[in-house]
Amino acid sequence: MLYSTLVLALFSASFSAAVPSGHEHARFHKDHHVRDVGHSLTIQLKAQDDVKDPDDLTIATTIINKGSKTVKILNDPNGPLSQWKTHTFDFVPLPSAGPDGVKSKTVGQLADVNAIRVKYNPSAAAALDDPSTYTVLQPGENKTVVHDLSGMYNFHSPGGYTIKLASPAQYFDVVEDDGSISSVPATLTTGEAENTSILNIPASG
């Protein structure tokens, strides 16, 4: 009963079927008022090494506190700290190369996404002060979350795709010492390996 009450207080969810990724940005986008509070948060995206079936897909996200202060980040269900099956990632096809080795200047179609829509209230979450609603990172500390994306994405063609953060996932809500909430942009980094954020979809059959 307590869990149900908590969920209803924080957000409401519904299911969105087969919506193209690019069209969802405007629908989910929220205004972010970024404050210069000195926080520095980076995020690394890593696709699984061997994708045999695009319907059985996982992505690992690692959030790193690069700043000099401890941060208290709300676990927004639309963001990379949550394992909810929301629209957190976009998959952008890499330009294909022709027989002469020249890459095409046109970009293919984004993968369609079947995701849960979530209306989230950061202020209500912060007021609860429940440890399950936030993540605390000390300076230099990181947290990795593995996202199960099984059955969520429809890839229109095989080949390489770059993993991007969808609009709702590009900012973190950070609770300050005075209780206010700052919107901190997520700086995307590839980490040590340049190809970690590249997903290769095999040809069917």
Image (spheres, rainbow, N blue to C red):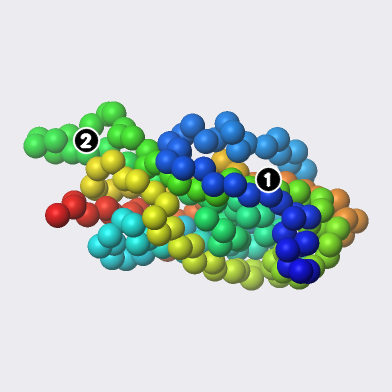
Task: Please name the residue shown 54% across and 35% down the image.
Answer: 25
The residue type indicated by label 1 comes to Lys
| Residue topped by disc 2 | 103
> In the shown orientation, is residue 121 left or right of residue 127?
left
Q: Please tell me the numbered disc located at residue 193.
A: none
The local crowd at label 1, few if under 14, some if 14 to 19, many if 20 or more residues have their Cα within 10 Å, is: some
Residue at x 54%, y 68% (from the top left corner) = 144
Q: Tell which circle, 1 or 2, labels the residue nearer the N-terminal end.
A: 2
Q: Is residue 104 above or below residue 136?
A: above
Please provide percent x and percent y for residue 129: 83, 65
> Circle 1 is placed at which residue position?
119
Query: Helix, strand or loop at disc 2?
Result: loop
Seen from the viewer's position, the closer of residues 53 and 174 is 53
Q: Quadrant of residue 112?
A: top left
Q: In the figure, is residue 152 to the left or right of 175?
A: left
Left or right relative to 165: residue 128: right
Instruction: Identify the image quadrant of the N terminus.
Output: bottom right
Does any portion of residue 142 appear in the rendered image?
yes
